[in-house]
Amino acid sequence: MTIYQFLLLFLLWVCLPHFCSPEIMFRRTSVPQKRILGARVPRSDGKILHRQKRGWMWNQFFLLEEYTGSDYQYVGKLHSDQDKGDGSLKYILSGDGAGTLFIIDEKTGDIHATRRIDREEKAFYTLRAQAINRRTLRPVEPESEFVIKIHDINDNEPTFPEEIYTASVPEMSVVGTSVVQVTATDADDPSYGNSARVIYSILQGQPYFSVEPETGIIRTALPNMNRENREQYQVVIQAKDMGGQMGGLSGTTTVNITLTDVNDNPPRFPQNTIHLRVLESSPVGTSIGSVKATDADTGENAEVEYRIIDGDGTDMFDIRTEKDTQEGIITVKKPLDYESRRLYTLKVEAENTHVDPRFYYLGPFKDTAIVKISIEDVDEPPVFSRSSYLFEVHEDIEVGTIIGTVMARDPDSTSSPIRFSLDRHTDLDRIFNIHSGNGSLYTSKPLDRELFQWHNLTVIAAEINNPKEMTRVAVFVRILDVNDNAPQFAVFYDTFVCENARPGQLIQTISAVDKDDPLGGQKFFFSLAAVNPNFTVQDNEDNTARILTRKNGFNRHDISTYLLPVVISDNDYPIQSSTGTLTIRVCACDSQGNMQSCSAEALLLPAGLSTGALVAILLCIIILLVVLFAALKRQRKKEPLILSKEDIRDNIVSYNDEGGGEEDTQAFDIGTLRNPAAIEEKKLRRDIIPETLFIPRRTPTAPDNTDVRDFINERLKEHDLDPTAPPYDSLATYAYEGNDSIAESLSSLESGTTDGDQNYDYLREWGPRFNKLAEMYGGGESDKDS
């Protein structure tokens, strides 16, 4: 194939419509591209194909970051085939940083960077270039897009996200155990050179730890590192770029590594033998001392359980483990006695509760120690032969009879004599007493089981040589019953017999009670003290009896009441009996035997009211009382016209005595009523808020002996013409009464009781404010007529 044929096939592949790509292909160049002239290529159908001319071709420029020169950094050159070098074309640049970061020479097409560029801020810039005719401003080439890519340099060192790491690893770990992984990042371009390739190394922490160069994983480098020897380690890791080669940048971080505890140490007692002392008087449960085994481990690995495994005091003492202090507390299990035994020996074992099977080879994780306990003697109080005493005695014994004896001894080797006494708080009535020397308990007063069946006493035994050493014991005295009480009626019986009763009719069932308590239970017998012609007693043999009539024809007018003596006897020894008298009333009964009345006077009385009627009458009376009380309260509750005696609108003085009238100058000084000067100054009203504030007008002082009617008319006229007067009726008081009044009194309190007729028509002449008052009093006659 010739070169011509090859070129022809290439042109066909590029320019055919079905195969030609719409994208513009660019290639990098820093020199102007030569125009490729079109060539005619004959087609098989005889038509000639023409190739489109391409003025310029480029793809991208490369620029090195962090330029440090003093001049602008040269990027590249744009050139069009249309440029003849005569300055007729103008190159225009637009896009990222055009005009600020990147500038272009309009005539030559040279592109420069105006400042240093950091690839880590932006890796590439996309711009558009176009060549236009300087005179016509029309483009001579279509606009093309190109990229300025920033070449990376190694200007960033590797950095760790944290300055200090904290990690832990169990002690006694094998070599190569992973501790923690640290990772550093490098802001340089990882796809260009080795600027971002990081290698890790350890600067501090050898020979205990190592780090993997590629991954940054820190591992243990020594076997059996013991926490008890050293717990904290500080490791410094370096991350270096350029693959760790010379000239690479580096960064460091610190890793604080703690060895965590494992159970690799058994507990150990600091001493093989431990001595303790305890008083023989120590009660059960008393703590007498503690033992402790030390463990170099911490936490649950140091937890120890204590137990007594051997010794002659296993029955007398016990041990418990105190979780907070990890101590073994030895306590008293049974009462101690110095006189019986003075020394005990225990073998105590301490064992770890959490054992790691990996360290079984280190030996048994337990230890033992011998504990010797010495018993110390104390002066002990007396000891009774029993923990409590129970004595039984009959209630009929004579005073001074011994009912029992308590015994006590001094457990000490000295065997001090003992004195007995009674705690009188348990025998306030002093019924019993005790012999101080031998402990014999006897009676000092008669006993009565019916009053107290039990007596709970307390006997005190104290050493004569040391009275502070004393012991108390409970003594229970049970009083046994003796048949010394006669039976009686169980209740009071209200018995009646009907006038129309028949012979043999049951009128009452009786029963009895007895304060005694025989062993075989109560058994009573009922009988009549003498033969009675009217009534008889029938014993039911179940501690009850029936009262029956022996005749008929009872009449309450003849005999209204019968007395029936009944003898009640018991079945114990000695037999006790009593006579109870039944009072039997004669009553009138209906045909059903229901009692109606039991007295002769009841025949004259009307039938009684029922309970419902009585309740209804009582409710009506209560309602009437409530209504009456409310009415009285409403009548008495009259609000005074003036609520306060100190109100500035009045000059009323009230007294509790009536006095002798105006002529009685001893009771009241009337001069205050004849004081026209008291109203000389007109003051503003304080009971209302005037809409407009007017200057108060001074009125001439009323002359002495001025008639009250003239005075009131004058004041009324002033108020009618006063624009500040309230739009409602109000009361105005004056400290001036005047000489006299034809109406005698202006009060209406006594007008209703006056016999004579009064003419109130003059009230209409006083103005519209008194029309209502004139209607009330002026129309009295018409009201009566109607």
Image: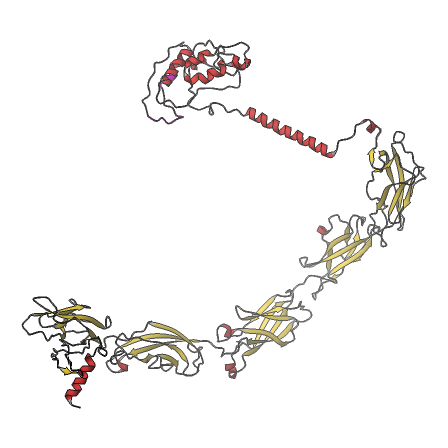
Instruction: Residue at 79% x, 54% y: name it.
Output: 478
Colouring style: secondary structure
Q: Is residue 696 magenta?
A: yes
Q: At which x and y percent is residue 285?
A: 62, 66
Q: State which region is magenta.
A: 677-703
Q: Is residue 509 left or right of residue 724?
A: right
Residue furthest out toward the bottom: 1
- Tell me what residue is drawn at x 92 percent, y 36 percent: 552
Q: Position of residue 419 (x, y in %)?
A: 73, 57
The percent coordinates of residue 673 (x first, y second) are: 43, 14
Question: Could you tell me if residue 430 is visible in this image?
Answer: yes
Q: Which of 678 and 557 is in front in this view?
A: 557
Left or right of 520 on screen, residue 772? left
Identify which residue, 715 or 774, lies in the foreground: 774
**Would you place residue 720 above or below residue 183 in this image?**
above
Q: Is residue 45 left or right of residue 203?
A: left
Is residue 674 among what the camera can see? Answer: no
Q: Quadrant of the C terminus?
A: top right
Q: Give percent across and percent down for residue 587.
A: 85, 34
Magenta highlight: main SS: loop
Residue 71: name its quadrant: bottom left
